[in-house]
């Protein structure tokens, strides 16, 4: 099956088919052998060309938020057989939203921005402590902080919404 997939607003042409060993996937012509297992509560385990990845996936209106190795990505699927335009055309009209999610369980140490502040791509937003390490969660684009959904010292779980940027 062929699909256009957008990851953080960048388009990829993806073809995939089920095989005896899992799923054969071609991304922009580059081939991967994938074995995927759905765990519980939105958690998945992937084996891609013999390398293991854990992911948390949640549905966001018309797209998905995918957390892999501490990085949150927005993923949209476009089926060329449908008659609806791709999400990219909606975004180019100015519709954009980032939901910052906890990539792992931990405690909110501090916020580096507040409601109403403008943020740049790559700017630090939140410091999350996990296993005695401080992790800085960064913006994946530009926008304005619309909502902070947690408080300092709050314990969060993987995938929990922390902040909304539009």
Image (cartoon, grey):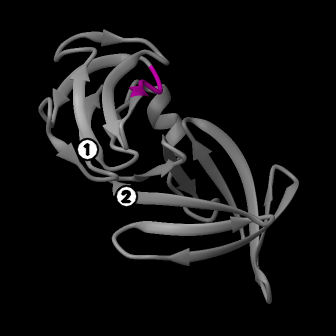
Label 2, label 1: how far apart the Cα atoms are? 10 Å
Where's residue 67, x and y in %?
47, 49
Residue depicted at x 25% and y 14%: 113
Label placed on residue 71: none
- Label whose residue precedes the other's in the sequence (2 or 1): 2
- Please tell me whether residue 66 is drawn above or below residue 136 in the rendered image: below
Taking depth in this image into account, of 147 and 84 the one nearest to the observer is 147
Q: Quadrant of residue 81?
A: bottom right
Residue depicted at x 25% and y 44%: 161
Taking depth in this image into account, of 4 and 51 the one nearest to the observer is 51
Where's residue 154, x and y in %?
14, 39
Task: Check if residue 25 falls in the magenta segment.
Answer: no
- Which image quarter is the N terminus in? bottom right
- Which image quarter is the C terminus in? top left
Label placed on residue 161: 1
Q: Mark 2 points at which residue?
A: 58
Question: Start and end of the magenta stretch?
Answer: 136-141
Q: In which quarter of the image is residue 132?
A: top left
């Amino acid at each position: 099956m062929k699909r256009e997939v957008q990851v953080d607003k960048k388009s990829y042409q993806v073809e995939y088919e089920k095989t005896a060993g899992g799923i054969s996937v071609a991304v922009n012509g580059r081939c991967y052998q994938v074995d995927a297992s759905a765990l519980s509560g939105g958690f998945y385990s992937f084996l891609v060309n013999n390398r293991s990845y854990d992911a948390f996936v949640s549905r966001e209106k018309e797209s998905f938020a995918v957390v892999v190795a501490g990085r949150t990505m927005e993923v949209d699927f476009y089926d060329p057989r449908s008659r609806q335009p791709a999400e990219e055309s909606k975004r180019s009209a100015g519709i954009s939203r980032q939901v910052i999610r906890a990539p792992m369980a931990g405690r909110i140490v501090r916020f580096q921005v507040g409601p109403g502040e403008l943020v740049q791509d790559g700017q630090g937003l939140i410091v999350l402590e996990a296993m005695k390490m401080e992790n800085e969660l960064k913006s994946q684009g530009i926008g304005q902080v619309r909502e902070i959904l947690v408080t300092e010292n709050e314990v969060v779980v993987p995938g929990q919404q922390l902040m909304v940027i539009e």
